[in-house]
Amino acid sequence: MSKIALIIQREFNQRVRKRSFIIMTILMPILMAGLMIVPVLIAQYGSSPSAAREIVVVDSSGVVAPALRDEQGLAFTATAMTYDSARMAPQYSGAFGFLVVGPQVVGNPSELTLYTRESSTLAIENNIREQVRRAVYQKRIEQANVPGLDSILERLQVYPVLTTYRLDARAGGEGAARESSSAISMGVSYALGFIIYLFIFIYGAAIMQGVIEEKSNRIVEVIVSSVKPFQLMMGKIIGMALVALTQFAVWVVLIGGTMLAIQHFALGCADAMPAELTTAVKSLDGIFLLKMAGAFLLFFTGGYLLYASMYAAVGSAVENVQDTQQLQLPITIPLFLAVVVMMNVMHDPTNTVAFWFSIIPFTSPIIMIARIPFGVPAWEVALSAVLLYATFLLIVSLAAKIYLTGIFMYGKKPTLGEMLRWIRYKG
């Protein structure tokens, strides 16, 4: 077995046997599910306060007060008092606020004022505004004195349902089409792009931390007596890559199994589901998933190898994590920039910014994987991948020279200029 293979095996076994790795591999899918479910539960059960807020209604028009209904944590109480009298009345001392409705509110809906003893919220104001709108709308219909006007207006309302098809020969020949969903494309785009960013950031930093620890403990001096520094660096990078891919594979099995179960259930209950959700579920065909899995492996691996080599070089140049802040900046800026651009890409994956950021190797792993769900010409994917791996080969050769010098440097924090000079050393 080659020396690099032995280092890969050591790194892999050392990482995957850690309790933290096992716990996070199992818990992360649960946490991801929680991130999707908890906001829904909060919106459903946390939007209403434990006690209803009383709103005293001073209605000079006689139109609004009878139409108000208690809902969403609000309780309306109509009064014949004036606003000043109601505000000072003992029976309303605990009221949250007072809604004053002008006598001409039907003709002038701006005759509406809310006074509150505590800070109001957008939900409260929207609730009141909508209820008043319905009351005034109904009154205006009555004043129009047109028989059946309400039902006529309702029939005139239009609620378009847009079904999207993508022309695809796989659907059954030339000119055939299959149902698609931009929501699913956007969701897959964001998820995979963010996962690549997260994995590169976490595992790149882990390699840097590992190199710093070995250097600080002088373990590296013992190791390089048997292997070359370049072999050590490559073994650590590839070993950590296998750890990351193993973790991701477990996540795919757990999350993918859940998605397939949901898809099977959803298709079986399609009649009871909204049309948009049924379309989204149907668009998750097997070929699409396989294409995305292959693209993810291609660009995740290339992106990880590119950045991991730079993180390893930074780790070899310092003696503690605190000294890495300045040296990490040129590495992290392209990653953060890619995440920012990814949000724009999901809305328009064909614009010039999206194209160039998916070609530039330092941002292409995130941006290209974010574009692929929407459909990208094969030549663009191939060009992006070739440039990515070619840049990795260039960067890893330069990083190896920094690594070769850096792991033997102690007692001094190098600058970026010094690290660039190390590249010119002949070793």
Image: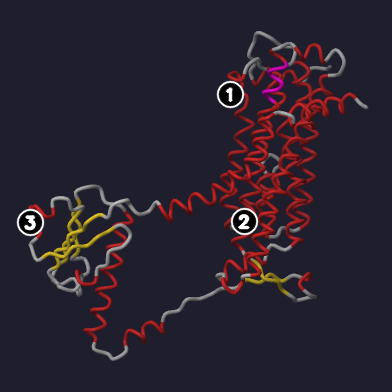
Name the residue that disc number 1 marks: 325
Main secondary-structure element of the magenta-colored stretch: helix
Amino acid residing under circle 1: Gln
Q: Tell which tag, 3 or 2, sits nearer the viewer.
A: 3
Residue 127, image quadrant: bottom left
Earlier sequence position, callout 1 versus callout 3? 3
Residue 24 falls inside the magenta stretch: no
User: Closer to the camera: disc 1 or disc 3?
Assistant: 3
- Give the crowd class for mark 2: few <14, some 14-19, many >=20 residues within 10 Å: few
Residue 217 x, y percent position in the rendering: 71, 12
The residue segment tinted magenta is 208-214
Q: Is residue 251 left or right of residue 5?
A: left
Q: Position of residue 251 (x, y in %)?
A: 69, 45
Image quadrant of residue 332?
A: top right
- Front-lying residue, 112 or 374: 112
For the N terminus, give its image quadrant. top right
Reply above or below: 312 against 405.
below
